[in-house]
Amino acid sequence: MLGVSIRAFSCKKFIIIDMLYTITKEFKVDLAHRIFNQDLDDRMSENSANKCRNCHGHSASIKLHLSAPVLNRQGMVLDFNNLKIFKSWLDKYFDHKLVLYVDDPWVNLLFPRLSQDLLQRLRKGEVDVLDDVSFYGEDIYDISENKVKLSADEQEWYHSLTLIPVPTSSEHLCKYLHKIANKILRTPHCKYIVSAVEYSETDSSNSIYQSNE
Ligand SMILES: [Zn+2]
């Protein structure tokens, strides 16, 4: 259950329940993705068209849950205002972007000029995400690490892309965003944890990743 930590001790008389305060903030993003390895089971599906292998879009909802056993001096888990930094991350990397898994075969097919060195850094976890700024900055590097000039249309095409180190299923996105939120929102001495991240592709489908801290 979100926000409740239960610790049972061997003494039969006492069960200590550490109640946690939890705040929740919902964010909305419009993004495109695909499930490159979708493989529906005929026995459990009306058809096996594997439509999610096609590039398609969602108006997705992301809910961030932060929990703490005690409140800060302002009587809060964390001021909601501080969550804007997470919204900025979503706006920059996810909103109105084509979000692809770095090992999706389409990456090299559709974006052949990407630096392989940068892709390797993403795979190794040296960076969390690659987008247009990461790709280019002041310079543009191609697959052989040479500086190249792209046309305006090519730049727009490349700038529409965000690459992440995990497949883009809802479940993976939940865990990935949990990691990102932890990095962005937590400080060395903060009392709160990112207790869960929910990701909803549609109003009727929801995935949750919960912290085991
Ligand atoms: Zn989808």
Image: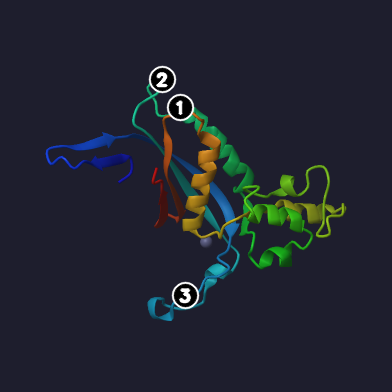
Labelled pair 1, 2 in contact (Cβ < 8 Å): yes
Q: Give percent across and percent down for residue 2.
A: 33, 43
Which residue lies under the disc numbered 3?
Answer: 40
Residue at (75% x, 55% y) in the render? 117
SS label for mark 1: loop
Q: What amino acid type is highlighted by mark number 3?
A: Leu
* 156 on left or right of 212: right
* 8 on left or right of 46: left
Nearest the viewer among 9 and 17 is 9
Q: Give percent across and percent down for residue 137.
A: 78, 43
Labelled pair 3, 2 in contact (Cβ < 8 Å): no
Which residue lies under the disc numbered 1?
Answer: 79
Labelled pair 3, 1 in contact (Cβ < 8 Å): no
Q: Give percent across and percent down for residue 25.
A: 44, 38
* 70 on left or right of 200: left
Residue at (41% x, 55% y) in the render? 206
Which residue lies under the disc numbered 2?
Answer: 74
SS label for mark 2: loop
